[in-house]
């Protein structure tokens, strides 16, 4: 049954089963989470490396939640009773959504029918191709404003004529810029079926330029497109790549996508999309994977762009991709050392993620 849901990784399937047993035997939610923290803490690094080698969104998100549970239970559980209760309820509820999907399609469907849609559901529906929930996602878009970004990110992975008018309405009406940008991604995925680009962008000049960029964008041959040089076009491109994470990065598109990632630091840190860019950058790197990124390291220009992109991340986001970088450890360290020796890169000794990674892996020696 789980195979039908496109779930991957026997390790996590076993972990989910063990977590369910802990929940059944625990007298309270707090004790259940503490027991699960004890159970998984020693194997988190193993899970993270496994997911980095063969990433899928459910596994990556489930492991990140387990990591958060371990952190909260061992280091960060709030002293304030109300806040403490909220954290426990939130972690417990989110954990059970993943445990439900690892139990099978019927268990997950039964659970979802009894509660409100969540961010975790959008990840599951997207990966498992649960097209039957598209109407629910569309209806919940207006009912749950805080979930709009997650919902539309999920929807752009599906096809269906009912989505065309949905995206068009979002693109034309006032709304959050990141959500409107994702609607343009959805419209672009309809290809020649959608031609009303002159009507999709009433608004300020920046949005008009974005619509013009989206209209001219070639989704079938990414490498033919202009690398974006403004924040709105960059966000659109990152969202477009993210909409096809499993297939977007390949031998043909690799150079162009790395150049896009390398352009991110030049856009600047002061923009409203910053956290979204961090999220998208991590996701694209994780799903590009070792086999695609190794050729990038062998090309000096691509290696420099990749290093710049990685150094753009704040530490909490950089930590997410450490398992991936560890899979490329020798090649990455050799390239960084060679480029530093030739003066091609000059990482900040105090701020550079890459330099910190090299020093950590080499015991403090370059």
Image: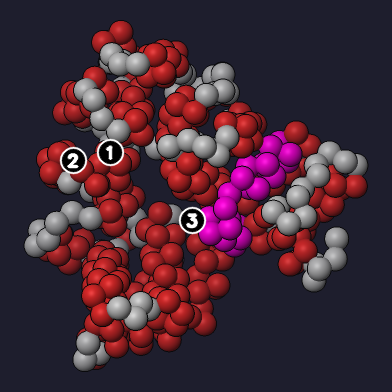
Q: Is mark 3 on a helix, strand or loop?
A: loop
Q: In which quarter of the image is residue 354?
A: bottom right
> What's the image's color scheme?
secondary structure
Q: Is mark 1 on a helix, strand or loop?
A: helix
The chief SS type of the magenta part is: helix
Q: Is residue 319 magenta?
A: yes
Question: In this rendering, is residue 211 above or below 240?
Answer: above
What label does residue 23 carry, if any?
Answer: none
Residue 245 in picture, x, y percent from top left: 45, 42
Q: Give the range drawn in magenta.
A: 302-324
Residue 144 falls left or right of residue 213: left
What label does residue 141 carry, if any?
Answer: 2
What label does residue 152 carry, if any?
Answer: 1
Q: Tell me the CA gap for discs 2 and 1.
A: 8 Å
Residue 104 falls left or right of residue 54: left
For the point 32% across and 52% down, the residue is 123
Q: Is the residue under label 3 in contact with that under label 1 (CB below 8 Å)?
A: no
Q: Tell me the CA gap for discs 3 and 2.
A: 28 Å
Of callouts 2 and 1, the N-terminal one: 2
Residue 43 falls left or right of residue 210: right
Q: Mark 3 points at which residue?
A: 55
Q: Is the residue under label 1 in contact with that under label 2 (CB below 8 Å)?
A: yes
């Amino acid at each position: 049954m789980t195979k039908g849901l496109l779930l991957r990784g026997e390790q996590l399937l076993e972990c989910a089963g063990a977590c369910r047993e802990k929940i059944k035997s625990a007298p309270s939610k707090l004790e259940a989470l503490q027991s699960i923290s004890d159970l998984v803490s020693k194997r988190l690094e193993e899970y993270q490396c496994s997911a980095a080698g063969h990433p899928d969104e459910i596994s990556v998100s489930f492991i990140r939640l387990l990591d958060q549970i371990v952190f909260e239970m061992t280091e960060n559980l709030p002293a304030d009773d109300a806040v403490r209760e909220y954290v426990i309820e939130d972690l417990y509820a989110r954990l059970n959504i993943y445990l439900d999907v690892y139990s099978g399609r019927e268990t997950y469907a039964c659970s979802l029918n009894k509660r409100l849609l969540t961010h975790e559901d959008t990840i599951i529906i997207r990966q498992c191709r649960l097209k039957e929930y598209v109407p629910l996602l569309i209806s919940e878009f207006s009912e749950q404003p805080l979930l709009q970004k997650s919902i539309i990110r999920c929807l752009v992975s599906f096809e269906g004529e009912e989505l065309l008018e949905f995206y068009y309405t979002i693109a034309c009406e006032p709304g959050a810029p990141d959500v409107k940008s994702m609607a343009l991604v959805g419209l672009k995925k309809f290809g020649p079926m959608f031609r009303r680009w002159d009507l999709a962008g009433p608004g300020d000049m920046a949005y008009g330029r974005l619509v013009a960029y989206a209209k001219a964008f070639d989704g079938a041959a990414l490498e033919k497109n202009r690398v974006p040089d403004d924040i709105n076009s960059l966000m659109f491109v990152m969202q477009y790549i993210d909409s096809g994470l499993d297939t977007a990065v390949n031998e043909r598109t690799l150079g162009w996508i790395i150049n896009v990632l390398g352009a991110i630091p030049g856009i600047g840190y002061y923009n409203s999309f910053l956290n979204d860019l961090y999220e998208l950058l991590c996701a694209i790197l994780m799903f590009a994977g070792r086999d695609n990124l190794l050729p990038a390291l062998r090309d000096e220009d691509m290696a420099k762009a990749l290093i710049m992109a990685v150094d753009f991340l704040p530490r909490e986001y950089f930590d997410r991709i450490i398992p991936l970088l560890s899979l490329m450890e020798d090649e990455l360290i050799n390239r960084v050392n060679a480029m530093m020796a030739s003066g091609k890169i000059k990482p900040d000794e105090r701020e550079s993620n890459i330099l910190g990674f090299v020093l950590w892996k080499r015991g403090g020696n370059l």
